[in-house]
């Protein structure tokens, strides 16, 4: 079954400069928790325990985050403040982390191929931490997708309807509806112009991939923006076999943009933080 989750996390985060000049964009906090931690928690909830992170230069804060911090932990040992570390400790008790570096930025497809050394020959999930997916009480998006994988055993992308004037920011699919919210993909285009988009069903940063994707990626030529695109490799898989697109249940925030990040912050503050802390004096 699926055990590993790959996090492509080598990008520069230029839209958040200067904040991301010396800090990884994945460490930007939504309220009091870095984006990457939300992603790892979603993966754990889906039953995945091996986190495989494709990192890059200047990104060591991520590795330190998922490790012990002796001095800090010693200082707050036995005080109320220890409770703030409860979630991160539970993550470290329930999962392993491995890292590899992407030396050159040649696109998402290239980042995923760089992660092959951590994944090997088994199906795996991919989570882009920029896309923050939240649920109130139901299953998280990856958990929904892992359930589908058990049934269909093929690559799956999560999709969401977006306004037509935003399709140029995404990979866009067109397919045949085979079941409620599940499409068999017929066409996939990376960042199409509005007039060329086959639909308004945009891929968001959650994938389940079968390991044959690595051989396909090795032979995928650079596409839009001169980058090796996972969308192009998946289109090849769809042609040769089957790729599903799943209209997931839940809320998604594009935390790669300032507006999405602020929306996520407001939402998380109101939904998770303010209510839990309203009675505590701080
Ligand atoms: C990547 C993918 C794109 C997908 C998007 C989701 O684009 O290439 O197909 O729709 O993630 O966030 P990026 O946002 O890295 O440009």
Image (spheres, rainbow, N blue to C red):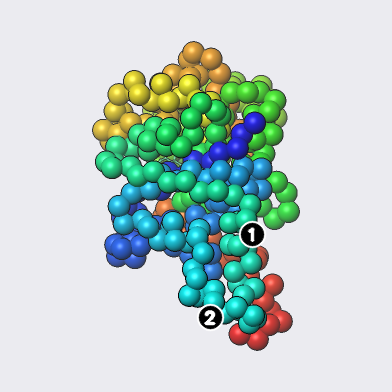
Any atom of ligand 1 within 8 Å of the CB at mark 2?
Answer: no
- Residue 90 disc label: 1
Q: Nearer the viewer, residue 250 or 109?
A: 109
Q: Nearer the viewer, residue 192 or 70?
A: 70
Q: Quadrant of the C terminus?
A: bottom right
Q: Nearer the viewer, residue 30 or 174?
A: 30
Q: Residue at x 63, y 52 (%)?
A: 94
In the rendered view, tell whether residue 132 sits above or below residue 21: above
SS category of the residue bearing label 2: helix
Indicate the position of residue 38 as horizontal and vertical percent values. Answer: 56, 55
The residue carrying pointer 1 sits among few (fewer than 14), some (14 to 19) or many (20 or more) residues within 10 Å by Cα, namely: few
The residue carrying pointer 2 sits among few (fewer than 14), some (14 to 19) or many (20 or more) residues within 10 Å by Cα, namely: few
- Dividing the image into four quarters, tell me where ligand 1 lies: top left
In the rendered view, tell whether residue 76 sits above or below residue 216: below
Q: Which residue is mark 2?
A: 75
- Residue 180 disc label: none
Q: Quadrant of the N terminus?
A: top right
Which residue reaches farthest top? 240
Q: Residue at x 26, y 33 (%)?
A: 226
SS category of the residue bearing label 1: helix
The answer, for residue 247, to whether it is visible in the render is: no
């Amino acid at each position: 079954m699926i055990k590993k989750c790959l996090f492509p996390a080598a990008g520069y985060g230029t839209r958040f400069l200067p904040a991301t000049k010396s800090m990884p964009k994945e460490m930007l906090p939504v309220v009091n928790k870095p984006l990457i931690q939300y992603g790892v928690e979603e993966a754990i909830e889906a039953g995945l325990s091996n986190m495989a992170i494709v990192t890059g230069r200047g990104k060591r804060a991520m590795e330190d985050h998922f490790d012990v911090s002796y001095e800090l932990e010693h200082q707050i040992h036995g005080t109320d403040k220890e409770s703030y570390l409860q979630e991160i400790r539970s993550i470290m008790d329930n999962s392993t982390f491995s890292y590899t570096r992407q030396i050159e930025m040649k696109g998402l497809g290239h980042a995923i191929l760089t992660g092959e050394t951590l994944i090997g020959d088994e199906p795996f999930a991919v989570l882009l931490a920029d896309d923050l997916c939240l649920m109130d009480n139901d299953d998280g998006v990856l958990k929904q997708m892992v359930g589908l994988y058990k049934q269909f055993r093929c690559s799956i992308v999560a999709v969401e309807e977006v306004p037509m004037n935003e399709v140029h920011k995404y990979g866009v699919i067109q397919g045949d509806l085979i079941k409620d919210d599940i499409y068999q993909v017929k066409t996939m285009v990376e960042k199409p112009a509005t007039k060329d988009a086959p639909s308004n069903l945009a891929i968001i940063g959650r994938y389940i991939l079968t390991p044959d994707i690595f051989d396909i990626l090795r032979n995928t030529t650079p596409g839009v923006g001169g980058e090796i695109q996972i969308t192009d490799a998946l289109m090849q898989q769809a042609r040769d076999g089957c790729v599903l697109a799943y209209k997931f249940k839940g809320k998604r925030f594009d935390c790669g943009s300032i507006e999405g990040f602020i929306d996520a912050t407001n939402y998380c503050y109101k939904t998770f933080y303010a209510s839990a802390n309203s009675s505590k004096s701080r």
